Image: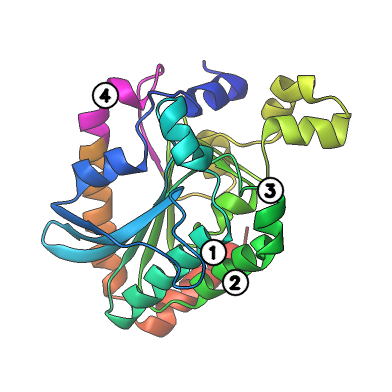
Amino acid sequence: MITAWEKVKLARELDRPKSLDYIKALFDEFIELHGDRNFGDDKSIIGGIASLEGMPVTVIGEQKGKNVKENMERNFGMPEPEGYRKALRLMKQAEKFKRPIITFIDTPGAYPGMGAEERGQGEAIARSIMEMSRLKVPIICIVIGEGSSGGALAIGVGNKIVMLENAVYSVLSPEGFASILYKDSTKAKEAAENMKMTANDLKKLGIIDKIIKEPENGAQNDFERIVEDIKKYLTKNIKELEKISEEGLLEQRYQKFRNM
């Protein structure tokens, strides 16, 4: 049995598939769109228009790198305010054209730098959460690796929330939790066990809707099968969600998060 801390380490593996890997494998076409139309283009969040089995969708994902150079370019998957504002711009565009939204969550948290705070990091996250709760199109969120803090929740307000089996999803990292509660970041392993951050824990708590199975040693070892499972889930559930009225989608999303 894999422990919570072991799953944290698996979720952080450099060779674990990233958002772009899933986007390229899942969709027939993907046109990436850039910029928040205000400050710049944050490369730690990618997004655009894609086709899923002939169905137009909007896709947004937090993107880590697989080596030091890529991680520097992607800011280690830690979005700044313009990243969340870009994501929200694309989500509002999706609502305008009635496209379902699919998000891929994989971040250690929003970037905590001074510049990000000066440009309104907290406001950008809060607005994204608020606006996602109001969008009148189906939203499915998939946690593919590390989903930590408001940086993850900012693109995680969906009608359906899915997790890969070895992904983690929590209010903050185990190291941060240990530093705050135990005053000792070296107790991260103990914190991980107590945080109930694994897919199995969160499914029991009713926070997520589906667990996508993966090998014990990581999604990279059975990537094609995992992609197929995700594609089947997306296709089936988007069709079901599209049968629900706009008011019904909003109510379902509200009740989902109200009951957490």
N-terminal label among 2 and 4: 2
Q: Is residue 247 above or below residue 213?
A: below
Determine crowd level at label 4: few under 14, some 14-19, many 20+ residues with C-alpha closer than 10 A. Answer: few
SS state under label 2: helix
The magenta segment is: 211-226
Q: Is residue 222 magenta?
A: yes
Q: Estimate the spatial distance between the alpha carbons at disc 3 and disc 4, rounded to whole Å.
A: 36 Å
Q: Quadrant of residue 193?
A: top right
Q: Which residue is mark 2?
A: 127
Q: Quadrant of residue 182?
A: top right
Q: Is residue 92 above or below residue 182?
A: below
Q: Amino acid at mark 1?
A: Lys
**Are dots 1 and 4 in contact, CB under 8 Å?**
no
Determine crowd level at label 1: few under 14, some 14-19, many 20+ residues with C-alpha closer than 10 A. Answer: some
**Are dots 3 and 2 in contact, CB under 8 Å?**
no
Does residue 258 appear anywhere in the picture? no
SS state under label 1: helix
Residue 52: x and y, percent? 18, 57
Closer to us: mark 1 or mark 2?
A: 2
N-terminal label among 1 and 4: 4
Q: Estimate the spatial distance between the alpha carbons at disc 3 and disc 2, rounded to whole Å.
A: 19 Å
Residue 25: x and y, percent? 20, 41
Judge by depth and name the residue closer to the eye, 235 or 75. Answer: 75
- For image coordinates 32% across by 82% down, the residue present is 96
Residue 216: x and y, percent? 41, 18
Q: Which residue is mark 3?
A: 113
Q: Which residue is mark 1?
A: 256
Q: Amino acid at mark 4?
A: Asp
Q: In screen coordinates, is 13 left or right of 122?
A: left
N-terminal label among 3 and 4: 3
Determine crowd level at label 2: few under 14, some 14-19, many 20+ residues with C-alpha closer than 10 A. Answer: some
**Number of numbered discs present?**
4
